[in-house]
Image (spheres, rainbow, N blue to C red):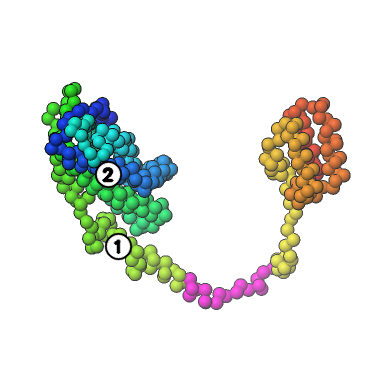
Amino acid sequence: MALWNQRDLKAPPPMNALCKSKHIEEEIRDATKTCAEMLEYYTTLGKFQTATAYLSSFCRSYRNRKRNMHGFQIMRRINQALVRMKRMNLVHVIMDLHSFFPESNFIDRQVNLPVRSNLEYLLVRMQGLAKLLLRVVYLTKEAARYHLKQIAIVFLYHSFAMFLGLMGELWLFARAICRRTVEFYNRLHPVLNILPNADQQQWLPDGYELPADLAGWLGEEYEREILYICQGKDMLELGVNSNIFNLLDHHSKDEMENELTRMEDEAKTNSKEEKPKPSSSSVPKAMLLQSLRSDTGVQVSRTGKLAFQNFNRQFNYIKSKFHVQQFIAQERAKRKERPQEAITKGISEREFESFSVELMRSYNELSSSQFVQMFKDAFQHLLHGVK
């Protein structure tokens, strides 16, 4: 596996060494300025991190419902690439390197500079970051193409419209970050010539050379995906004779719409025609008299098993003697202060007090479960007259 593609790449120990600054003052100042700009840039990507968090949340929320959809599978691959980028912890690497450069414009004759291996590790990490960003740019376009197909057929329109907007945002940020990463890399690579070598064995493997131009190393894909500026006439083809610019073209109706229009016209025509009324001469007189009688309905009693189940569900939280005492105290307070909110608002004060007195007589005689069951039976009888 290539060095830039290793996930758990072991970093060299951060070290510095004393060297003479004669003839390299400008290079040292440029390196310090570049590291400071990199820190400022990579620590202010709040909007990109927010979009990344949205994607991670979508992948977690829809992992079961949309797991077999091709566009959602691409989104999960994008999320994996973004997670790898976060685990690089590039800001921490830049801070370690920046801390060894002199902070002031005045440079002594001898200064402590970071060793060559520290900068090599940062450049290798930037190679991996650029590759991951290219992957994100490519996959976001593929996911957007799939989402546009679903929007074109109006399938789960709101979900795929939301996914499409997120893919566009990630595509825009990934292109900008990749472009700046290549710029920072090209500015840092010449600094390798002025940094001292460590006393230990070299960190880079034998035969591995860091390219001087990262854009040239990335090749044609970088020019096509990052440097290319889209023209107004460019279209994202969907492969189904549709693109993003004609999705909202509704001037022509398809066969289903034509069929629906024809059926609606036939329904309007039929509703205007007079329908023959059925003759009542063939209907027996007894049936006619029965049809003229008013339907008073049948009284149905619903205070049986269903009412009992609803009652138990309502008072399921009462499971001890303390709960019974608390409920009676709260109900007595509601009857005095807010009568309309009381459950026993239709019960007279005399009946309610008689119920409380009869219940408390058995407070010390019964166990907690028996007392709760006695309370529920007596209270149901008080409300509905059912025992």
Calculate the distance from the C-alpha at mark 1 to the C-alpha at mark 2.
Answer: 39 Å
How would you classify the magenta stretch by its main secondary structure? loop
Residue 164, x across and y down, in percent = 35, 53
In the image shown, does 364 or 293 lie closer to the viewer? 364
Which stretch did the figure color magenta?
A: 267-284
In the image shown, does 384 or 110 lie closer to the viewer? 110
Residue 134 to residue 94: above or below: below
Residue 59, x across and y down, in percent = 39, 42
Residue 120 to residue 225: above or below: above
Q: Could you tell me which residue is drawn at 80 percent across and 50 percent down? A: 346
Q: What residue type is labelled 2?
A: Glu
Residue 196, x across and y down, in percent = 17, 30
Q: Residues within 10 Å of mark 1 (few under 14, many from 20)?
A: few
33 within the magenta span? no
Q: Could you tell me which residue is drawn at 13 percent across and 27 percent down? A: 206
Based on the displayed image, in which of its 4 quarters is residue 350 positioned? top right
Q: How many marks?
A: 2
Res 155 label:
none
In the image shown, does 337 or 249 lie closer to the viewer? 337
Q: Could you tell me which residue is drawn at 30 percent across and 59 percent down? A: 244
Q: Which element is circle 2 on? A: helix
Q: What residue type is labelled 1?
A: Phe
Q: Which element is circle 1 on? A: loop
Res 37 label:
2
Residue 135 to residue 287: above or below: above
Residue 161, x across and y down, in percent = 38, 54
Residue 130 appears in the picture as rendered: no
In the image shown, does 28 or 272 lie closer to the viewer? 28
Res 245 label:
1
Nearer mark to the viewer, of 1 and 2: 2
